[in-house]
Amino acid sequence: MRVERLTVNIGAEVTGIRLRDAVGSDDLFDEIRSLLLRHRVLFFRDQDLGNFSRADHVAFASRFGPLETHPVAGSHPDYPGLVQIYRSEEKNPYENNWHTDGLWRSNPAMGAVLRCVECPEVGGDTIWVNMVEAYARLPDDVKSKIDGLRASSSIEHSFGAVMQDEKRRELGRQNPPVEHPVVRTHPETGEKILYVGSFTTHLLNYHTPANVRWGIDKNPGAGLLLQYLQSQATIPEYQVRFRWKPHCVALWDNRATQHYAVMDYWPAPRKMERAGIVGDVPF
């Protein structure tokens, strides 16, 4: 196995292994998991269907924990938990925003394994950002202000926005808004993580005497603070950008990162398959 760091703060490319071998090898799997905690996102090339089938994909992801289902995207009929993200007929902007998968869940995904089936000759990159670093680099006064804050996240205003009104409301009823700490703690490393993204709608406990003097401090003040926190994901120094080729695989720690799928390739096709891993309740 060879490991090459791709940036100072996030990302490494791993070569010299077959991911399917990690399904049955505790030593190899443990090494990959250790690398994941260190680099946040790992990339593996040349994992074609001959040595990394859909069954292998699901089995490898399942070593980290049970797989999620998605209320909108569904999953492969023969491989529960394997979501087919196929963009070939119409432009779809859902992924071209900074997001943590499933932030609208009470227990957002622990991580995910994403394989490229087909991609454009150029374009369709994915960018990941290290939200541990984003928190660490915040000014001290901002860290103090957001200490103990909680925020609400929702699927209804994102996936539901293009639905007919009643279908959107039903999606919201089935998946009501959830609240999470603005700064969560990584359950394995103990690191602090800035934990707001595009699914985050508003801060919940900002309106206190310490933060609010007059009405303008309340809604505009909280909204501007949230926008500032969300903007930290856009800082290039915290990011790594990956150019896909068929049979490339990415594995990322969804607790410590956000990602953004660049929508610059349509009408060329882009077909990806993802297995999301059930996570814990953030604290």
Image (spheres, rainbow, N blue to C red):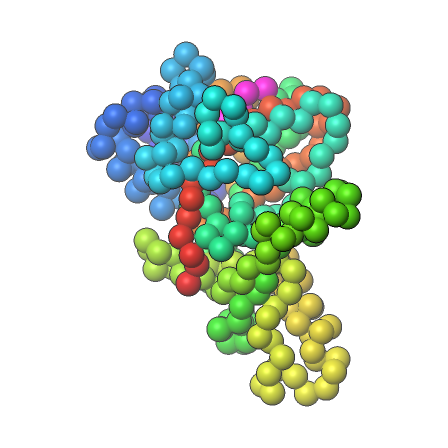
- With respect to residue 1, does 72 lie above or below? below
Q: Which residues are magenta?
A: 114-118
Q: Say whether residue 45 is visible.
A: no
116 in magenta? yes
Q: Residue 125 in the image: x percent, y percent?
A: 60, 32
User: 12 or 79: which is nearer to us?
Assistant: 79
- With respect to residue 174, does 21 lie above or below? above
Q: Residue 31 in the image: x percent, y percent?
A: 27, 36
- Residue 192 is drawn in which quadrant? bottom left
139 in magenta? no
Q: Residue 139 in the image: x percent, y percent?
A: 54, 70
Which residue appears at 71% of the width and 38% of the height? 93
Image quadrant occupied by the C terminus: bottom left
Q: Residue 114 in the image: x percent, y percent?
A: 49, 31
Relative horizontal placement of residue 1, taking residue 6 as reference (left or right): left
- With respect to residue 240, does 184 lie above or below? below
